[in-house]
Image (cartoon, rainbow, N blue to C red):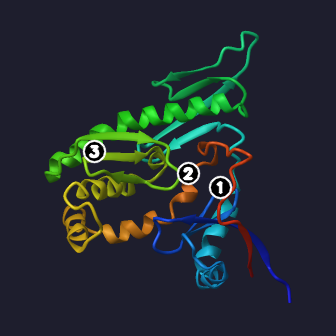
Amino acid sequence: MTLGEPILCEVLENPRSSNVRLRFSKNGVLTVVVPYGFSKSRILEILETKREWIRKHWALLKRVSFESSGAGPERIDLAAFGESWEVHFTQNDRGAGGLCEDKEGRRLLARGARQDRETLGRLRQWLVKRCRAGFGPWLDGLSRAHGLPYRKMAVRIQKSRWGSCSAKKTISLNAKLAFLPANLVEYVFCHELCHTLHLNHSRAFWECLERILPGSLTMRKALRGCEPLVPGWLEAPKSPSETPPGGHLTFYLQ
């Protein structure tokens, strides 16, 4: 009997997790997030129960092909804003790094090599700046429309969370949202605005969310499969010393 197609799994222990969560990275690694002290012998059993989910997302990754975070993009499609930006990388004798933006032509001129970490870092900074400009008025409009005020908004590139809301009503948003459809971005905004009233996931919270955004449950489910929409260059390269505390294993997909 053949074992089938191997999928490398990265096991991460998270003391704040109460259950097991799965997600795929752009290079095809399946991350398995487990509570601290979770029995490793149970992980393969859980993967078996999620085989169809794994098969579906593995096929999607293979269709779009794995992206490497080692090279910059030639095009940046921001679905949330309905924008597409061309990216041109140039190198000259002066060697000065920088990033120029042509808003009218939707072009970015990056001075540096596509594989250069500093050049990719500037593209990430540009994305965060673009999201701050675009998310601010959008979030403000929803806040006023639903009578859910917040104190301030922060935008940065986060590894896994799409958004969060603190006890002081500061809403933090992931710049990766720019690559998602607008209706799912609005779902995240409304989700965090409801946390200004209910800083939990109680029944009252979900009722509040459904009241201001009918069909929120369907959107919540759709959001779970959106990680492949985020391009690989957006992930900052890991340090060679950065190793997952839970280790690795291989799951065979037949």
Report the residue that reaches farthest toward the front. 37
Q: Amino acid at mark 1?
A: Lys
**How far apart are the alpha carbons under marks 3 and 1?**
29 Å
The answer to which of marks 2 and 3 sits earlier in the sequence is: 3
Residue at disc 3, secondary structure:
helix
Q: Which residue is mark 3?
A: 139
Q: Amino acid at mark 2?
A: Val
Asked if marks 3 and 1 touch (Cβ < 8 Å), the reply is no
* Residue at position x 62%, y 24% in the image: 110
Residue at disc 2, secondary structure:
loop
Residue 169: percent from left, percent from top: 25, 48
In screen coordinates, is 130 left or right of 252?
left
Q: Which residue is mark 2?
A: 230
Q: Quadrant of the C terminus?
A: bottom right
Q: Is residue 188 above or below residue 136?
A: below
Residue 11: percent from left, percent from top: 64, 67
Q: Is residue 68 above or below residue 247?
A: above
The answer to which of marks 2 and 1 sits earlier in the sequence is: 1
* Residue at position x 30%, y 68% in the image: 201
Q: Residues within 10 Å of mark 2 (few under 14, many from 20)?
A: many
| Observer-nearest of 79 and 227 | 227
Q: Which residue is mark 1?
A: 26
In screen coordinates, is 84 left or right of 211?
right
Residue at disc 1, secondary structure:
loop
